[in-house]
Amino acid sequence: MRTSESDIVIVGTGGQGVILISDVIGRAAVLAGKSVRGAETHGMAQRGGSVINHTRIGCRFSPMVAPGGADVLLALEPAEALRFAYFLSPEGVALVNTTPVLPVTVTTGKAVYPPLDEILSPLHDLCSKVVAMDATAIAKKAGTAQAMNVVMLGALSHYLPLSEDILLQTLSLVVPPKYLEANKRAYAGGKAEVE
């Protein structure tokens, strides 16, 4: 699904690496000579709150993706996928990490986290394809659980109008050298999930 333009909404909770993904995509787009616009919200992110990023490659106007206009919804947390599903285009794709981040209301017994099927089922009705993967387990296998976001970047790479060479070059600019090989393995693991 590579075109010269792509509207992506990246969502997760504070500390999951939403901002790193958007940073890599933005820098890679600039290196590729493409116009890129972005907007992010992460006010209470440090407390585990929602983080949302809009990234538009090949766009000349607004940095915000319109509801119903996202080519890809990249969700680092399943409930966040459902929370922001209204951004998905009917022709869009949802890429979802299946490992939940339990809010304090769940861990204290005041609420129940919904079963994964109840989260993913409505997504199938909103877009053309849902790819659910345990990106956290893939990252652990690659050598570092903290690279879960890079697993998701690898999955997303299939839908970006950017070459793998440029994405990996950009990744090497933002990831500390001692973690780069594990992150490259994480990226490859995510890419393999979509292929």
Image: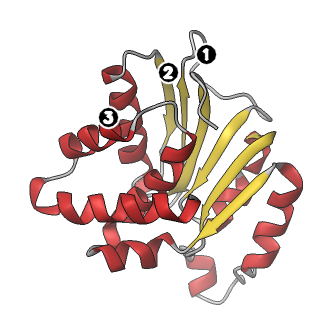
Residue corresponding to mark 3:
166
Does label 1 or label 3 sit earlier along the sequence?
A: 1
Amino acid type, label 1: Ser
Q: Residue at x 19, y 40 (%)?
A: 173
Q: How far, Cα to Cα, is label 3 from label 2? A: 18 Å
Where disc 2 sits, the SS reads strand
Amino acid type, label 2: Arg
- Contact? badges 2 and 1 (CB < 8 Å): yes
Residue corresponding to mark 2:
37
Where disc 1 sits, the SS reads loop
Residue placed farthest to the front in the image?
195
Q: Residue at x 75, y 82 (%)?
A: 115
Query: In the rendered view of the protein, which quadrant contains the N terminus?
Result: top right
Q: Residue at x 59, y 37 (%)?
A: 8
Q: How far, Cα to Cα, is label 1 from label 3? A: 25 Å
* Mark 1 neighbour class, 10 Å CA radius: few under 14, some 14 to 19, many 20 or more: few
Residue 159 picture quarter: top right
